[in-house]
Amino acid sequence: MARIEYQKTKEQNLPAVTPNSRNFENDHKGMAENKLDPTTWVDAYADYLFNYAIARINDAEIAKDLVQETFLAGLKSAKNYKGDAAERTWLIAILKRKVIDYYRKSNSKKGKAEVRINYGSQTDAEGDWLEEQVADPFSNFEHSDIENEELGLAIQSCIEKLPKKQAQVFTMKTIQGISTEDICNELNINPSNLWVMIHRARTALMGCLNQSWF
Amino acid sequence: MISCEKAAIICNKIQYKEATFIEKLKLRYHLLMCETCTKFSKKNSQLTSLCNKAHLHGLSNKEKEQMKDRLRSKS
């Protein structure tokens, strides 16, 4: 008993050593690197998560809902966050569960999980050989899809590293395809300003993607 | 003869198909004598093709605002 008491006091006297313990986060708020800040989530990670989701779900509306649910779930379990993963990795882990749950739910109705193959029921294919419908072994569509998803996420995380304003202008222009005039009106800048920002963003992106993609 | 800064801006405009014909001519002329800008221009079009290849999707600002609102109401 006395020994336990001793250990307890010893622990109290020592400052928290592990970066994972909650004490540390409270004491050194400014120092802890992996700290949750839900107010910045949407601006910082929404596009990245959305790209991740849409590569797996293929439906923009559902993907958007899943991203929203991910943020809400993250907020709910923020107190369980131990700080040993980066914020984005943590959110991706939640999103992954959401995607799995989505497929589980949509397959739970009886019969939906079955794969049904129509053997040439189309009339114009009548008389054709089944062999012709076999997947082409030389096509590398699947492969390029995977590569493109990786590329998309790589670009997205490079955009995250840009200064906020540049990232905003670049996404609006390149990804959302909004016209120069509309962006200028919305952000209250003049066109030459916009082009300078685009230029800086593009140069930074080239540097960021340089190692692996050029 | 235009400066390299101007050339770069025109080059960026071309990536979004917003350069005028005269601007394009100016850039062509500049690229003939400036090696650095030629390299930049090449990389720039590469970046554009990468962005196209990646099929990037983005949420609009309005959708993001909605998300923020919903997050705020829950917290």
Image (cartoon, rainbow, N blue to C red):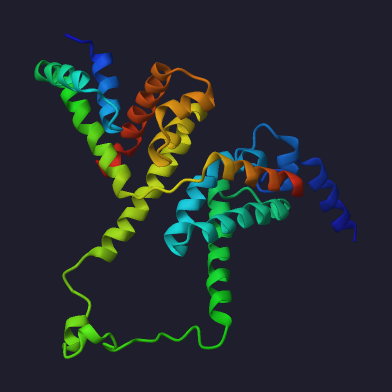
Q: Residue at point 67% right, 53% down?
A: A72
What residue lies at 9% left-to-right and 19% top-to-bottom? B32
Quadrant where the N terminus of chain A sits is bottom right
Question: Which residue in the rendered view is the most extreme toward the front?
Answer: A123
Point out residue A193 in the picture as x, y percentages from the top left corner.
42, 18
Q: Is residue A90 above or below residue A210?
A: below
Q: Position of residue B13 (x, y in %)?
A: 29, 26
Q: Nearer the viewer, residue B19 or A157?
A: B19
Where, by quadrant of the figure, is residue B34 drawn? top left
Outermost residue on the top side: it is: B1
Q: Residue at x 40, y 38 (%)?
A: A177
A164 up-or-down from B10: above or below: below
Q: Position of residue A132 (x, y in %)?
A: 17, 82
Res A166 visible: no
Q: Residue at x 22, y 19 (%)?
A: B23
Vertical relation: A40 (above or below) A68: above
Q: Quadrant of residue A208?
A: top left
Locate residue A58, reporting x and y percent.
44, 62
Whether A63 is drawn above or below A128: the answer is above
Q: For this rendering, which residue is in front, B19 or A156?
A: B19
State whether residue B32 appears in this view.
Answer: yes
Residue B30 falls left or right of residue A145: left
